[in-house]
Amino acid sequence: MTGTLGLFSLVDLFQLLASSSRSGRLLVEHPRGVARVYFEKGKVVHADFESFKGEEAVYELFSDERGSFEFSLGLPAPEQTISGSTENLVLESIRKLDESRRDNPNQTRSLDDGAVPSFTDKAPDAGNLTLYANEVTVLRVIDGRRDLKQIAKLTKLDLEEVKRVVSRLMRVGAITVRGKKPRVARLVAQLARRPLPPNVVGIDTKIVDNWRRVVGYKPNRVACRRPNGKIDTFDLEAHDDVGPYILMSRDTLFTANLAANTALLVKPLPSEDNRS
């Protein structure tokens, strides 16, 4: 197996060799010299690079990921200098790289504040990782619904620290991250056939439930943007089988000077108890 680092990352390479339980030597033709990493049934047992040996050689290689590589099956290690698991070795290498880049945010992985982390199929393997306290804290509150900003608030950790933790755990395959779920619905104003209090709108229960999953609480107010850009706010009631409509009483339509059949961009608002 041969290739070029940059097109194929060391994280991916180590994980591939570990998951396939390969034994042999990974040789990296680095601009600074030759690096050798030996695997035994998927476990890294020895590494040397320049004057570095063992784990320090791996950390140094991760910090300057360049060159071509070749994996040769069956070549035994000349000595054993590494005793931990490959997964923990990779995670610690990523941690050290994060620390070296802490003062240069442009080099760190960019994650949107609204990204939502969740566990992958490999999550049970995360139990074999030796985790730092802040990593355990973050993992405990990941539920597939909370975004990074909510996790930071709940754990009382700095948002940038949460991003670093999530990025590390993503790279070792413990979690995955999806983009921020949409909170805005395009709904058409319609006269309600059943009584609604003034300044209260009716929206389909399914839409309200989806918003609840996204924001982490049941919204009771909405903001509605008209085609001309004007924004109105209303109290919210959930109604069954409303579909793509936002129901309003005649009084509400009149007071808001809003015509029926007007398309609105509607998004949930937090109640006073749920404001950040």
Image (tube, rainbow, N blue to C red):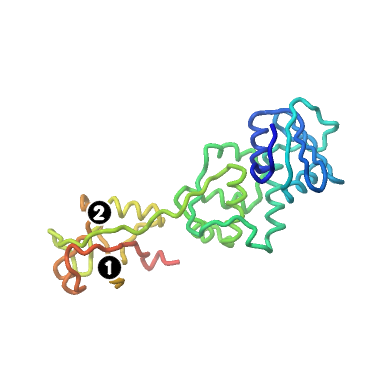
Helix, strand or loop at mark 2? strand
Q: Quadrant of residue 7?
A: top right
Which kind of residue does numbered mark 2 sit on? Answer: Asp
Cα separation, mark 1 vs mark 2, equals 21 Å
Q: Is residue 154 left or right of residue 3?
A: left
Which kind of residue does numbered mark 1 sit on? Answer: Pro
Question: Where residue 134 appears, x then y in whole percent?
Answer: 62, 54
Q: Nearer the viewer, mark 1 or mark 2?
A: 1
Give the mark nearer the N terminus: 1 vs 2.
2
Image quadrant in which the C terminus is located: bottom left
Q: Is residue 228 left or right of residue 196?
A: right
Question: Where residue 151 appears, x then y in whole percent?
Answer: 52, 56
Local crowd at mark 1 within 10 Å, few (<14), some, or many (≥20)?
Answer: few
Residue in front for this viewpoint, 152 or 186: 186
Seen in the picture, residue 148 relative to 13 is either above or below; the reply is below
Q: Residue at x 40, y 64 (%)?
A: 274
Seen in the picture, residue 216 relative to 45 is either above or below; the reply is below
Question: Where residue 130 appears, x then y in whole percent?
Answer: 67, 43
Q: Are marks 1 and 2 in contact (CB under 8 Å)?
A: no
Give the residue at mark 1.
227
Residue in front for this viewpoint, 21 or 271: 21
Q: Residue at x 78, y 45 (%)?
A: 30
Q: Quadrant of residue 71?
A: top right
Helix, strand or loop at mark 1? loop
Question: Where residue 112 appears, x then y in whole percent?
Answer: 51, 58
Local crowd at mark 2 within 10 Å, few (<14), some, or many (≥20)?
Answer: some
Q: Quadrant of residue 183?
A: bottom left
Image quadrant in which the N terminus is located: top right
Give the residue at mark 2.
204
